[in-house]
């Protein structure tokens, strides 16, 4: 392969031997000159040589000193500031090498036991003192008092007529404990269901209207006065076009109570149920009660709720209010939640 050395010299400012077969396009004299200048820079004033890192550090110190002098002159007012070029095309890449030593102190590695104490330290100076013995075994007087009370409770009080047939004839009133025992729900095997009275559904009965607005308007008319009713059609259209919707509104605007009913009225409960989560149990119960009243159905039929230890839903439930924990528990059985439409 032949090169035209004059053309290359004029265009690329390079020079090479035309007779040589080397592909190195460079000027040896120019490179030797640069090497000589670099060697001069690596020599200190006292004649000793320094490495490239030391030379770079010295040049950086000189540059920092020059910048400090320029700042001092600008503060004094003798020199005006000029534009400084802040964009540099630095081809050098700085790499940071971080060495991590995973070391553990000797008292944590478990190989050597540094303590000389074989037994634990007792917080009591005298373990045989009366206070220490009583704190461990308990007071004999308190134990004797408890035994007497338990004996009195187990004793048959024939002189008490309340709850007996003779007491009923004489008109002696029963105590609160006897009334609770008589009204307790007894199961098929004779056991008493103590959780029956603690269910919230027993207390979620229809309450009468309190305000004048509730007394003068029906439930359907009250729904139309809510702010969300004015955007009902637009909201349903957005729900049809999107999979995830974020609704933002003030408290009491009808987001929780009306949105589920709008979805039911639009046909979303044909092939599934509508689920709504609430942060607290009381909120889930109260909202479910209100929606059941507006839909004119019993709580637990078409509208129900599910909280911890209580599930007030049925086969006909199409709107279900629940806490976040209940929904998470249902994902363990059905990760896709196929029974929920929305």
Image (tube, rainbow, N blue to C red):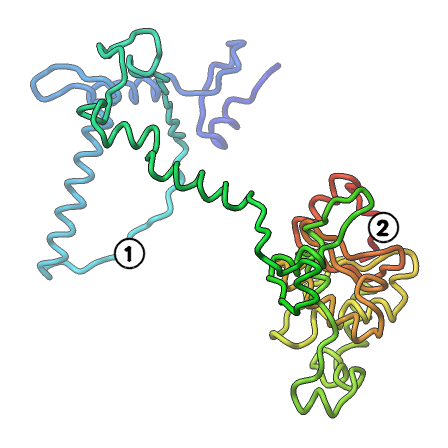
- Secondary structure of the residue carrying tag 1 is loop
Counting residues from the start of the chain, the first of labels 1 and 2 encountered is 1
Distance between mark 1 and mark 2 Cα atoms: 70 Å
Q: Which residue is mark 2?
A: 339
The nearer-to-camera label among 1 and 2 is 2
Give the quarter of the figure containing the N terminus: top right
Give the quarter of the figure containing the C terminus: bottom right
- Which mark is on residue 83? 1
Please tell me whether residue 39 is drawn above or below residue 225 in the rendered image.
above
Query: Would you say 138 lies left or right of 310 here?
Result: left
Q: In the rendering, at what x and y percent does residue 104 appear?
A: 33, 16
Could you tell me which residue is drawn at 22 percent across and 34 percent down? 60
Please tell me whether residue 60 is drawn above or below residue 296 in the rendered image.
above
- Secondary structure of the residue carrying tag 2 is loop
Q: In the rendering, at what x and y percent does residue 280 appear?
A: 61, 59
Mark 1 packing: few (<14 Cα in 10 Å), some, or many (20+)? few
């Amino acid at each position: 392969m032949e090169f035209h050395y004059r053309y290359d010299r004029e265009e690329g400012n390079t020079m090479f031997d035309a007779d040589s077969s080397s592909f190195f396009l460079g000027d040896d004299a120019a490179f030797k000159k640069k090497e000589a200048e670099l060697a001069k820079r690596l020599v200190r004033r006292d004649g000793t040589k320094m490495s490239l890192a030391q030379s770079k550090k010295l040049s950086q110190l000189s540059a920092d000193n020059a910048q400090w002098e320029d700042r001092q002159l600008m503060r004094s007012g003798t020199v005006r500031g000029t534009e400084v070029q802040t964009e540099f095309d630095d081809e050098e890449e700085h790499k940071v090498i971080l060495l991590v030593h995973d070391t553990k102190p000797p008292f944590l590695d478990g190989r050597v036991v540094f303590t000389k104490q074989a037994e634990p330290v007792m917080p009591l100076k005298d373990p045989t003192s009366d206070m220490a013995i009583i704190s461990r075994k308990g007071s004999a007087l308190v134990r004797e008092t408890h035994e007497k009370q338990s004996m009195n409770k187990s004793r048959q009080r024939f002189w008490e007529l309340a709850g007996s047939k003779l007491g009923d004839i004489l008109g002696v009133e029963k105590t609160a404990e006897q009334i609770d025992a008589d009204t307790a729900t007894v199961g098929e095997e004779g056991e008493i269901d103590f959780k029956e009275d603690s269910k919230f559904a027993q207390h979620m009965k229809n309450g009468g209207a309190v305000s004048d607005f509730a007394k003068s308007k029906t439930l359907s008319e009250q729904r139309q006065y809510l702010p969300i009713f004015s955007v009902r059609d637009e909201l349903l259209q957005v729900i049809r076009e999107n999979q995830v919707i974020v609704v933002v509104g003030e408290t009491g605007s009808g987001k929780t109570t009306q949105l589920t009913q709008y979805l039911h009225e639009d046909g979303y409960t044909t092939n599934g149920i509508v689920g709504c989560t609430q942060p607290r149990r009381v909120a889930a119960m109260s909202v479910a009660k209100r929606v059941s009243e507006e839909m004119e159905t019993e709580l637990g039929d078409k509208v129900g709720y599910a909280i911890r230890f209580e599930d007030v839903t049925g086969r006909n439930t199409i709107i279900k209010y629940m806490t976040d924990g209940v929904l998470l528990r249902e994902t363990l059985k059905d990760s896709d939640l196929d029974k929920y439409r929305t």
